[in-house]
Image (cartoon, rainbow, N blue to C red):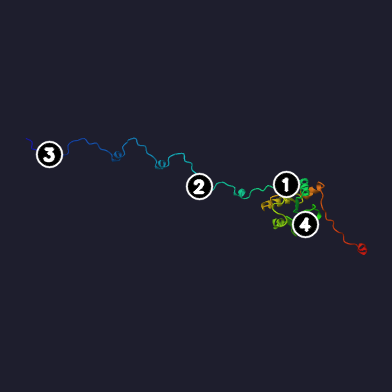
Amino acid sequence: MAPPPHENETSRSESAPATPVKTVDVQTAAAPDVGVTAVDVQTAAAPAVGVTTVDVQTAATPAVDTKTVATPAVEVTTVDVQTAAREQQDGMMYLDVRTEEEMGKGHIGGSLNVPYFFVTPQGTREKNPRFVEQVASLFSTDQHILVGCQSGKRSELACIDLLAAGFMNVKNVGGGYAAWLHNGLPVTVAVPTPPPTPESAAAI
């Protein structure tokens, strides 16, 4: 007859019954395959919603030509010598901006002279720094003025300065004194007085 089972053996059999146990990987259990799609955090934080990226410097500094705005172009009215002669006869003043030496060789009758350039001892031309001031001492800013020189270049520059200074009715004489002569218009030529001879001095 077999001996009865030991007490300890009986307890072990009852506390651990033969039940099939399935081993599960912890990592697999923590992330079951449930069809979840991984999402990039940066992509989720900035979805494509049609936002246009603007450069900060471009937005803060628009493309504006400040030079053009600060210095607008001055439009100079130019008339031919025939028109200038008629307007002078009607009472319009003539401003000759040539040098005194040029004026001495011939000028338009009734004209006033304020040189726009001076000739230096070295033979170069230097702009008259008091040109506008000297013109303002002779004419009012609303007076109608014809401005001429030898060919029309200096007088155009003079008109630009005068318009910028507030003179409202200045006109450039196109072609200047040379064109005036070419068209046979009247001029005044200073004839130098010859030095007295012994015979003429005796007669006096």
Which of marks 4 and 2 precedes in the sequence?
2
Distance Cα–Cα, label 2 vs label 3: 84 Å
Where is residue 49 shown, x and y percent of the image? 45, 39
Q: Choose mark 1 or mark 4, whichever is in front.
A: 1
Asked if the residue under mark 3 is in contact with the one under mark 4, i.e. CB atoms within 8 Å, the reply is no
Q: Are marks 2 and 4 in contact (CB under 8 Å)?
A: no
* Mark sitting earlier along the chain (2/1): 2
Q: Specify the label residue 56 is tagged with.
A: 2
Earlier-in-chain disc, 2 versus 3? 3
Q: Which quadrant would the C terminus be assigned to in this image?
A: bottom right
Question: How many residues crowd mark 3 within 10 Å: few (<14), some (14–19), many (20+)?
Answer: few
Which disc is residue 78 wearing? 1
- Residue at the spot 80% in from the left edge and 56% down from the top edge: 104
The outermost residue toward the front is: 90
Q: Is residue 124 visible?
A: no
What number is the disc on residue 102? none
Q: Is residue 183 left or right of residue 37?
A: right
Residue 25, quarter of picture: top left
* Mark 4 lies on residue: 100
| Residue 44 in the image, given as x and y percentages of width and height | 40, 41
Q: Nearer the viewer, mark 2 or mark 1?
A: 1
**Could you tell me which secondary element the residue under label 1 belongs to?**
strand
Tag 2 near tag 1, CB within 8 Å: no
Which residue type does callout 2 highlight? Val
Residue type at mark 1 is Thr
Spatial CA distance of label 1 from label 4 is 24 Å
Q: Amino acid at mark 3?
A: Thr
> Which label lies toward us, 2 or 3?
2
